[in-house]
Image (cartoon, rainbow, N blue to C red):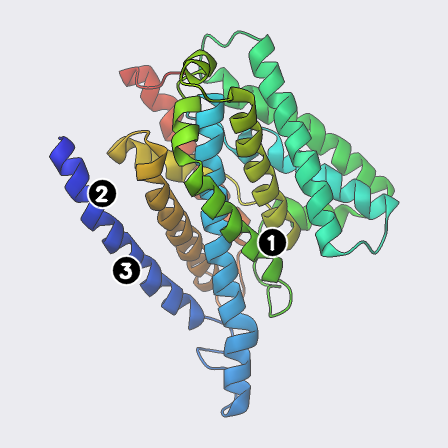
Amino acid sequence: MDSFQRSFSRWGLWALIALTLVASVVSLGIGAAGASGASSGTNDINLLWTSRVPRTIALLLAGSAMALSGMIMQMLARNRFAEPSTAGTVDSAALGIVLVMVLVPGIPVMGKLAVGALAGLAGTLLFMLILKRIPMRDPLMVPLLGIMLGNVIGAVASFIAYRTDLLQSLGSMQSASFSAIIEGRYELMWIAAALTVVAFIAADRFTVVGLGDNLTTNLGLNYTRIVLLGLAIVALNTAIVVVHVGAIPFIGLVVPNLVAMLLGDNVRRTAPWVLVLGMLLVVVSDIFGRIINWPYEVPLGLVMSIVGAAVFLTMLLRPRRKGAVHG
């Protein structure tokens, strides 16, 4: 079995990368104006480089960021069902962005990112604190608790948005759509690529933290620092995606669990898989959303909600039959 996993991990990853490249090329050729625009000449090239290429790059960056964030959350919370949308991180980031839009109108995108990341970090820390205070005998209680916390925070954000005429802005943050991504409106998403490098460097530490605080301390590592590093990566990635395109639900839940079922829990070994599979799933879902009702577009957030909810329900039922999930 180990030899199969090693062989599959080596060759399967290259196949996944190839599929992602193919899906990216297909994404470049889909749109209401066709693959090269409605007219010929310079306008075709402008359409490609100002709209199609930025959109595809944003899809790849968002998919990798949220999938990797989900894997980190699962290791830190030691629960298969933890990820930014089931831990209150997304709703906390949205609340922070709404508050800064009310208090500091006209704030630049970088300011929204900073406040959203801090709010997301605060909400996630609150979620982790609640987990420590309440004994969780059933691992299914963890995502349910996170969803309830997120709903409370989301209700506060909705109330503030309603009173300040920002419901449309809040709605755009709650469901991802890449239709507005053009050149000049996505470049800060490259920060997610830098965070990915940091996550790879700390991969072994995240694996150890997933084994518990006592073992982490016995191995000479600072448990608190590693947890804060992981949560900071998750919060900043979440804020980046929410500010630019809106929340992508369940991507951080589906991808890490699919990879873990095949390759186990070693973060250094599974991180490249999670990264590439997150990209592929987001790009394919976006393509599906663009062609299902062409020339109109179904937002990516809606497509991922349907796919993710189906997988989430399957995962909820699976442990009760096989006893495979542990907190």
Q: Could you say which quadrant of the image residue 310 lies in?
A: top left
Q: Residue furthest bottom?
A: 41
Q: What number is the disc on residue 245? A: 1
- Label 1 environment density (alpha carbons within 10 Å; few <14, some 14–19, many ≥20): many
Q: Percent from the top left, x then y, of residue 1?
A: 13, 30
Q: Which mark is residue 9?
A: 2
Marks 2 and 3 close (CB-CB < 8 Å): no
Q: Is residue 77 above or below residue 291?
A: above
At 42% from the left and 66% from the top, the residue drawn is 27
**Distance between the alpha carbons at the discs numbered 2 and 3:** 14 Å
Q: Amino acid at mark 2?
A: Ser
Number of other residues with Cα within 10 Å of mark 3, as a class: few under 14, some 14 to 19, many 20 or more: some
Secondary structure at badge 3 equals helix
Return the x and y of residue 30 as percentages of the image width and height. 44, 70
Which numbered disc, 3 or 1, marks the residue that appears first in the sequence?
A: 3
Which residue is at a point 48% across and 25% down the rendered structure image? Answer: 76
Between the C-alphas of marks 3 and 1, the distance is 26 Å
Residue 322 shown left or right of residue 195 in the figure: left
Q: Secondary structure at mark 2?
A: helix
Residue corresponding to mark 3: 18
Sequence-earlier tag: 2 or 1 = 2
Identify residue type, mark 1.
Answer: Val
**Amino acid type indicated by mark 3:** Ala
Residue in view at x 52 percent, y 76 percent: 49
